[in-house]
Amino acid sequence: MGAAAFDGRDPVSSPTRFRDAYQECERITREQARNFSYGIRLLPGPKRGALSAVYAFARRVDDVGDGDLPREDKLRELKNCREAVHQASTDSTDPVLVALADAANRMPLPLEAFDELIDGCEADVRGTSYTTFDELLHYCRCVAGSIGRLSLGVFGTDDPRVATARADALGVALQLTNILRDVREDQINGRVYLPASDLAHFGVHLEPGGGFVEDSARWNRLMRFQAARADRWYTEGFRLLPMLDRRSRACCASMAGIYHQLLVRIATNPNAAMHQRTSLSGWRKAGVAARSLAGMTP
Ligand SMILES: CC(C)=CCC/C(C)=C/CC/C(C)=C/COP(=O)(O)OP(=O)(O)O
C-alpha cells in the first residue's frame, strides 16, 4: 500500500475498507474521548485518522483494565491485545487494527509503545501500588508516555531524540493530572496511585476501598504538592509545541491545555477532588481548542 493511496479527506481515492476502518476509529474517538477529541479534530484528515486509531486501540486496552471481568480473564484479554498489535495487519478483520497497521505503514508510529501501555494495565490489574515517586513515574511513562510517543509519530518531528523526551514528559504530566482528578473514584475501586512515601510525609491515610479523607488541611497540602509536581512536567512537555507543525501544535496544545486547566482547578480546590470528579464544560474545552488553533500556547 503506497503512501498516496489513502487520504482521510478523499473518499474517492481511498479504498473503502481503509476509509471505513478510519471512520470507525474516529467514531470511537468522538464518542469516548471526552477531553482529547477536541484536539484530535484539529488535525488534517490522515493525521486525524491515525491518531484516532492510536486512541481507539489504547481505549480498548484501558477498557479491559477498567472493566468488570475477573482478574485472570483481564490478563488473558490484555495478552490478546498484545498479540493483536504485534500482528497488526491491513488484512485484519478488525477495523481498529486495519487503521493502526495502515497508519504505521505511512508514519513512524512506534507500535512497540503499546507493549508498555499493556505492561502498565497489567500492573493495574495485579493491583500494584507505588512506594516512591520514581515507581509511579515508571507507571506513568508506561501508560501515558507511550501515548505521547505514539502521538509524536503522527505529528512528525525533525529532532526525534529531543521531541520524544518532551512527548514522554507531556504524557507523564497528563497522567499525573488524571491520577489527581480520579483519586476518589480510584480509591473506591481499590486503587491508590499516590506514592506511599508522599502520603506518609503529609500524614494522609488513603486506604484502597476506604472512606473520605477527613483532615482537609493535610489533604490540601498533599494535593497542592502533587499538583506543583505535575505542573513541572507540563513545563517540560510544553517545550514540544514549538517543534511541531501548526496543526499538530494546535492538537497537542489543545489536548494538554484542557488537562492543564483541570490541574489548575484541582490545585485551586483540592478538597473538591475528594467528593467529585473535576471537569470542564464543553464551552471551556472548545475555548482551549480555539485558542490552540489560533496559535496561543496553554
Ligand atoms: C505528546 C502528547 C499528545 C502527549 C499526551 C499523551 C496522552 C494523550 C496521554 C494520555 C494519558 C491519559 C491521562 C489518558 C486518559 O484517557 P481517558 O480517555 O480515560 O481520559 P478522560 O478520562 O479524561 O476522558
Image (cartoon, rainbow, N blue to C red):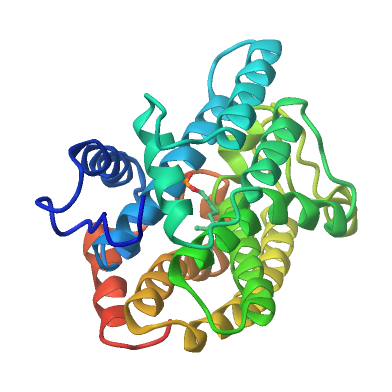
Q: Image point 47% across, 44% down: which residue?
A: 276
Tell me, yes or no, if residue 295 can be seen here: yes
Query: Image quarter for residue 236?
Result: bottom right
User: Residue 190: x, y in percent?
Assistant: 69, 28
Q: Image point 73% across, 68% down: which residue?
A: 225
User: Residue 70: x, y in percent?
Assistant: 64, 10
Q: Is residue 44 above or below residue 26?
A: below
Name the side, left or right, on which 31 lies relative to 119. Answer: left
User: Residue 168: x, y in percent?
Assistant: 65, 66
Number of marks in the image? Answer: 0
Indicate the quadrant containing the C terminus: top left, top right, bottom left or bottom right: bottom left
Name the side, left or right, on which 199 lies relative to 241. Answer: right
Q: Is residue 293 above or below residue 149?
A: below
Query: Image quarter for residue 282?
Result: bottom left
Name the side, left or right, on which 289 lies relative to 136. Answer: left
Toward the viewer: 17 or 44?
A: 17
Q: Image point 65% across, 62% down: which residue?
A: 172
Task: Kindly give the residue lying farthest to the front in the view shown.
Answer: 2
Toward the viewer: 154 or 167?
A: 154
Tell me, yes or no, if residue 35 can be seen here: no
Toward the viewer: 76 or 102?
A: 102
Q: Image point 80% across, 49% down: which residue?
A: 204
Q: Is residue 265 above or below residue 248?
A: above
Q: Is residue 122 above or below residue 153?
A: above
Query: Image quarter for residue 226?
Result: bottom right
Task: Kindly give the residue lying farthest to the left in the view shown.
Answer: 12
User: Residue 213: x, y in percent?
Assistant: 69, 43
Toward the viewer: 22 or 191?
A: 22
